[in-house]
Image (tube, rainbow, N blue to C red):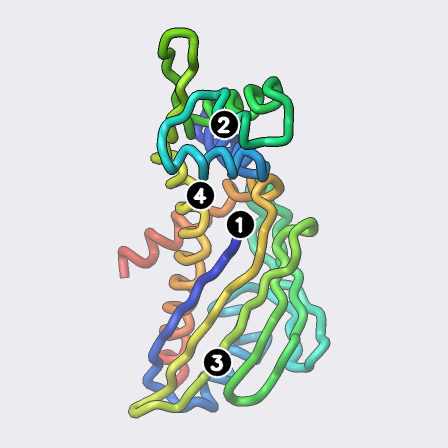
Amino acid sequence: MKIDLFFREFFPHPIEKVWASVSDRTALAVWLMENDFEPMVGKRFRFRHEPVAGGRGWIDCEVLALEPPSRMVWSWQSIETDEPGRVEVRLKTVAGGTELTLSHTGETDPERRARYAFGWPGKFADLHKRLSSS
Amino acid sequence: MTTVAANEAIFLAIADANRRRMLDLLAAGDSPAQDLAARFDISFAAVSQHLKVLREAGLVSRRADGRRRIYRLTPAKLRVVENWMATYRVFWQGRLKRLGVYLDAKK
């Protein structure tokens, strides 16, 4: 099964500020997840999240590309037995701010995924609540 | 079956390449088990076993036509797979929204 997701967001802030927020451990901890990221190609790091039913509670990543302030690529492995996915963030200056595009792609083995897939929705349900209340 | 177990059955059902191909073939129209089996290099017993897994997951239904068993794709449950993908979508949408809030607060 293939993950193939693509997002585009506009932020009314200069590209340097957005870059600082996507390439800094402390900032990433606030908006994404706890981590030990360092802005260095080849750096292996880990995002930690609440362990959920069937999940292991972390995502193993590696910085595959780093081109400040416009592009960063991470490998993204949430399950040991899957091939790592790929998360790519691109920033571009546009009128009034910065456009961020994020893609998350990769192959996953549905049989193994089946054992893990059902932990996430609980976590996302909370997120839904947050989003719909804001 | 609990919801989780039912969902798991769907993922397990589509984890096998032969079973996915059976679903593809049935997407083209209803088919007797024998006709399906003729398209595979595996034994009729093995095809039957795969069809049983698909049926128990609710992805195909079966009806009798005389002595033949006719299979039909019942794809509604594949929505579970779509929903799984949606969890990733919701995850990133939520996190990017949070990034926006973070940036706005950090004037």
Between disc 1 and disc 2, the foreground one is 2
Cα–Cα span, label 1 and label 2: 24 Å
Image location of residue A51, percent across then percent down: 59, 48
Three-letter amino acid code at the position of disc 1: Met
Residue at point 49% right, 27% down? B36
Between disc 2 and disc 4, the foreground one is 2
Is B102 above or below relative to A105?
below
Cα–Cα span, label 1 and label 3: 25 Å
Give the numbered dot on residue A34: none
Cα–Cα span, label 3 and label 2: 47 Å
Three-letter amino acid code at the position of disc 3: Arg
Give the numbered dot on residue B36: 2
Residue at point 27% right, 62% down? A134
Between disc 1 and disc 4, the foreground one is 1
- Chain containing mark 2: B
Image location of residue B80, percent across then percent down: 41, 40
- Chain containing mark 1: A
- Which of A109/A54 is in front? A109
| Residue marked by disc 3 | A90
Is A56 above or below relative to A41?
above
Q: Are marks 1 and 4 in contact (CB under 8 Å)?
A: yes
Image location of residue A98, percent across then percent down: 38, 86
Indicate the secondary structure of the residue bearing disc 3.
strand
* Circle 1 residues within 10 Å: few <14, some 14–19, many ≥20: some
Q: Is residue B1 visible?
A: no
| Residue marked by disc 4 | B81
- Which of B74/B2 is in front? B74
Asked whether, in this view, residue A97 is left or right of residue A47, the answer is: left
| Residue marked by disc 1 | A1
Between disc 4 and disc 3, the foreground one is 4
Q: Are marks 3 and 2 in contact (CB under 8 Å)?
A: no
